[in-house]
Amino acid sequence: MLLRGYAQRHSARRAVVLGGGVLGLEAADAVRRLGLETTIVELSDRLSPVQLDAGAARLLQREVTSRGIEVMLGRSVSSVTGEAGRVAGVTLDDGTRRDADIVIVCTGIVPNLELARDAGLAVRRGVTVDDTMRTSDESIFAAGDVAEHAGRVYGHWPAAVEQAEVAAINCIGGRRLYTGSLIATHLKVTNVDLTSIGRPHSEPEDVEIALADESGGRYRKLVLRDGRIVGAILLGHASDAGGVFAAARERRDLSGHLESLSQGDWGVLVDPSFEPAPSAAAGSGERAVGAASSNGGARMNGAARTSETASPVSPAG
Ligand SMILES: Cc1cc2nc3c(=O)[nH]c(=O)nc-3n(C[C@H](O)[C@H](O)[C@H](O)COP(=O)(O)OP(=O)(O)OC[C@H]3O[C@@H](n4cnc5c(N)ncnc54)[C@H](O)[C@@H]3O)c2cc1C
């Protein structure tokens, strides 16, 4: 509401959004819908690099640019210029300039650590906590965006709530351990169904099943470790999101279903009568590569890949 009021009062015509993550994309789409010419400046070589791989980011970028939003990747802002007390433009690190009546910074969160640091608590990126959400002072707990657990500052509401519950129980003498949160991020941009779950970037020991429908702008990918989903990207597959998230949260063993999953049959993820596959049939990463390769998928770094159409899926970053 403040942004809209500002844009109207000053007859704003152009906006620059710094950061092409989830919040930057949502902000850019919002100001575009206000009628402003909008540019996203993103440091990484793709949009939403934490949540998306190269294939999904490319499809999303196509969608975003088709709405008239300019996307500038691999660049940062070196200065913001002003005139008459108001922002007038930005200069990028490669010297490019863009006029801007509004600049929106969406480059992530930085925990406010002064209070904790002054109190002598151990801090890194956030206030460090152990599995009971206790800080380095045993009588002080931390939870939410300010807390760093196992090297991670989550910056997500569900994680803040889970951490707060654990902190509260331990505060009053109970015993509960926090082992991390499985996060699903939904992009709230009109007519774009994008969900990213857990760790969507595969590591060498993971099995990756990626299916792209380039012409339809749809993409879905699972990252599995020991037959269990540890990450997923769903672009244009909203109906799969609940099943994938539930399977990941419940750590269902999908080892016996890798072949059907890699062929695009994800019914097992929503089947209420799902019986965990016997672990004896569990495929190692190599076995799954074989299963997917027999379906025409390319072998890449121990990951299985197939395409829902003839269009090849390009490598994840
Ligand atoms: C634009 C935006 C969109 C978001 N969208 C989503 C989303 O869609 N889904 C999602 O899961 N998460 C989302 N988040 C993240 C989510 O809002 C946070 O993870 C969540 O609010 C964290 O809760 P918190 O209580 O740790 O911190 P906050 O909600 O930030 O609350 C901290 C409070 O502490 C107060 N405070 C600070 N210092 C002091 C002090 N010294 N003394 C007393 N009070 C103090 C602050 O004023 C504030 O009210 C979004 C965040 C932003 C900014």
Image: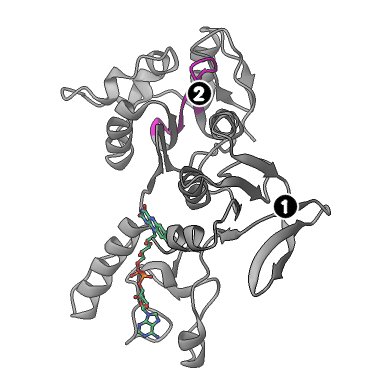
Question: Residue 98's mark?
Answer: 1
Residue 200 placed where, x, y %?
Answer: 49, 39
Residue at 59% x, 19% y is: 313
Residue 85 placed where, x, y %?
Answer: 64, 75
Q: Is residue 225 visible?
A: no
Q: Is residue 179 above or below residue 224?
A: below
Q: Is residue 217 above or below residue 167?
A: above
The answer to which image quadrant residue 174 occupies is bottom left
Left or right position of 257 against 217: left
The answer to which image quadrant residue 163 occupies is bottom left
Residue at 50% x, 22% y is: 217
Quadrant of the snapshot with the C terminus: top right
Left or right position of 54 against 28: right
- Disc 2 residue type? Ala
Left or right position of 144 against 93: left
Q: Which residue of the protein is positioned furthest toward the right in this rendering?
A: 95
Secondary structure category for the residue under label 1:
strand
* Of the image marks 2 and 1, the number of the one nearer the N terminus: 1
Left or right position of 142 against 174: right
Quadrant of the snapshot with the N terminus: bottom left
Q: Is residue 311 above or below residue 44?
A: above
Q: Quadrant of ligand 1?
A: bottom left
Q: Main secondary structure of the magenta part?
A: strand
Q: Which residue of the protein is positioned furthest toward the bottom in this rendering?
A: 119
Please tell me which residue lies in front, 286 or 229: 229
- What stretch of residues is rendered in magenta? 208-228
- Disc 1 residue type? Arg
The answer to which image quadrant residue 231 occupies is top left
